[in-house]
Amino acid sequence: VYSLLPDLLESYRSVYPEVQLDLRTGTAEQAVGQVQTGEIDLAVAALPDRNRSQIEFLPITTTPLVFIAPQQPDTLIALTIEGQLDLSRAPLVLPQAGLSRRRLDKWLKKKRITPNISSEVSGNEAIIPMVRLGCGVGIVPQLVLDRSPFRDEVQILANAPRLEPYVVGLCSTRRNLQRSSVQAFWQL
């Protein structure tokens, strides 16, 4: 949101200054659900991996999911096998739920790996300081890491599994897109 929303809002407000905006924060998955129930008109979120038929999605950017670790490289040597991150031994800091958690869980299940979960947090932004503090290895969207105040205090692990990236964009419903103010935001 920090990467995309400011420019979107600035463009919209410059063209439509009379439209009242109600901005809510929270998890992207909650926002998609709120779009689906009609509670909100639009959300900036990753393309969901389920219930896609119920939303309209306009892609804006793609961001990889990256594994991050504390800056102390000594601790990482013990967490590798043949140069690859060993997710059965590495303590993991993971989101409690959400798209990245489902993607990692699916990968772990496919590889028949039982993870060593040291911490679970409620959002991607919380993973980065937990990793920085040495609680374990985390997985976050690159877009989130790039905007984190702790980005220079963690490192991206090149020897980690590759998971499907996030496609981030605007979510709405066909019904909401019938409204001129929503359609105007969508077209920007």
Image: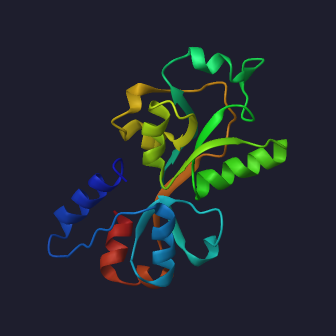
Where residue 91 appears, as percent x and y from the top left, is: 63, 35
- Write the residue at 71% across / 22% down: 80
How many dots with numbers? 0
Give coordinates of residue 44: x percent, y percent: 42, 61
Eyeballing the image, is 166 above or below 20? Answer: above
44 on left or right of 163: left
114 or 52: which is nearer to us?
114
The outermost residue toward the left is 18
Tell which of 158 and 188 is nearer to you.
Answer: 158
Residue 96: percent from left, percent from top: 57, 56
| Horizontal side of residue 170 vs 94, given as left or right | left
The relative height of residue 33 versus residue 8 in the rendered view (above or below) is: below
Residue name at image x 56 percent, y 60 percent: 47
> For residue 158, which quarter of the picture?
top right
Given residues 136 and 141, the one toward you in this image is 136
Q: Where is residue 87 in the image (x, y as percent from the top left)?
A: 72, 34
The C terminus sits in image quarter: bottom left
Judge from the rendering whether residue 187 lies leftward or rightward of residue 20; answer left or right. Answer: right
Which residue is found at the position 20% from the left and 76% from the top? 20
Which color scheme is applied? rainbow
**Residue beneath the point at 49% across and 54% down:** 168
Relative to 57, residue 79 above or below: above
